Image (spheres, rainbow, N blue to C red):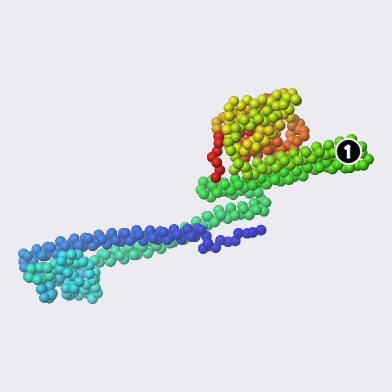
Amino acid sequence: MATVGPVRWWRSITVRLALASALMSTLSIGVVFGLLYWRAVGVVEDQAADTVGSEIRSLAEHHGDSGMIGLVQSVQERSAGSSVAEPVYLVVDRFGTRLAGNLLAWPPTVVPDGAWRKVELYRRGDDRPMLIGARAMPLAGGSLLLVGRALEGRVEIQEAIGEAVLWSLVALWAMTVGGGVLLSRTILRRVDEVAAINREVMVGELGRRVPVRGSGDEFDRLASSMNSMLARIESLMTGMRTVTDSIGHDLRSPLTRLRSRLERARDAGGSEVERERALDGAMMEVEATLDLLGRLLEIARAESGLQRGQMAEVDLAAVAADIVDLYAPTAEESGIAVEATAGRPVPVSGHAELLAQAVSNLIDNATKYARSRIRVDVVEDGGMARLAVVDDGPGIPEEDRERAAERFVRLDPSRTGRGAGLGLSLVAAVARLHGGTLQLSDAEPGLRAELMLPAGVAPPVG
């Protein structure tokens, strides 16, 4: 027996899904924090640029009012502090000599055109460069003025966002691994249940079913589908065993009688009449055996569902009328009137040959037990085509009606006689093939056997 080995973790679909989810989440976090960083830095720079613009215009106006001496004095006062959070100032003359401010020299990359620029510079008293945003403009007499702000807020934001991204990724991957393990255990537990049930079915435990939790999720739908399939397999296998056992039982008697008759016919001491009588009896037994095998093949063909692709539009009322015309003369000889009461066509999607065989079996079964009449009604009611064969015979007790359609069932005392007990079995199999049912009920008196099929014509297969 083949066994299912342990699933390697890297081959597990849940592990791959968890990793894919983690990758997508990582990308999502990167995009979100990237947009956040871009926006936050932009806000910091915009505020710094606006502040610097206002301040450099104010100092330029002060230069116009108080001259260079007043400007230098104002810049010295503003740049006297040493905190890195304070502004950056620089005033140089037309020769580039520093007059006031907290920068050592004029930055060569800064053009005095009033535009906003970011540059790394050394402030006076600092031994490390710092990132500043600055504006510079020319003054009267060729001197230059530079005002800037340290963009330390941008660096702090960058560090904060980097730290947030790091911890977010740690938390994300921890949740992903934990969720993946939990998901794997949950899914693999359900998969293992299905695999275990399949292994038990493979060794003959056809009654096993996959548990349905009632959650309505995909596993429950899969379990329901598998249970329907297993029920169908169990039904077919049970039917096969029943047929095998019943054939062995029911064929033994006719074959034994056939052998006996052939032995008598071979007996040289017998008369010519006795030999002919024995051969006639043997022929009858052969015909009965062939009929039994033929009915079993018809039932197997109907239950296999191989005819679904051969279904077409069939008028059930016309089929019933044709079968009634076929049986009416023989039934009249026995004093039984057979009539069909179909008023209009009743179309169904079906297999014409099997439907005709089912109707024939119902009427043939009725002629065996009817006292004086058989009525065949075909109507369409509520989307269902109903074909009812009603006789006035002894009927079937209510407790026996369910098993009357089983194979090789012959009821006593009212429904005994010649036959293998396969007539109603074939009708039930044909009904199932067409998505319908066979129902037996009391006709008061007699039996009402009703074949119910979906009315209308189904779209073509394929």
| Residue, far front | 272
Q: Say if residue 280 shows up in the picture.
A: yes
x then y, percent, for residue 232: 63, 45
Q: Quadrant of residue 358?
A: top right
Residue pointed to by mark 1: 275
* Left or right: 307, with 419 as reference point: left
Q: Residues within 10 Å of mark 1 (few under 14, many from 20)?
A: many
Q: Quadrant of residue 251?
A: top right
Of 450 and 42, the residue lying toward us: 450
Q: Say if residue 70 shows up in the picture.
A: no
x then y, percent, for residue 146: 15, 68
Q: What's the residue at 62%, 53% (across, down)?
A: 198
Q: What's the residue at 20%, 71% (across, down)?
A: 109
* Left or right: 176, with 263 as reference point: left
Of 15 and 372, the residue lying toward us: 372
x then y, percent, for residue 154: 26, 64
Residue flagged by tag 1: what amino acid is it? Arg
* Left or right: 385, with 263 as reference point: left
Say which quadrant the C terminus sits in.
top right
Q: Vertical placement of 217 versus 175: above or below?
A: above
Q: Vertical placement of 156 versus 356: above or below?
A: below
SS label for mark 1: helix
* Left or right: 114, with 185 as reference point: left
Q: What's the residue at 65%, 53% (across, down)?
A: 202
Q: How many marks on residues?
A: 1
Say which quadrant the N terminus sits in.
bottom right
| Residue, far right | 269
Q: What's the residue at 27%, 62% (across, down)?
A: 41
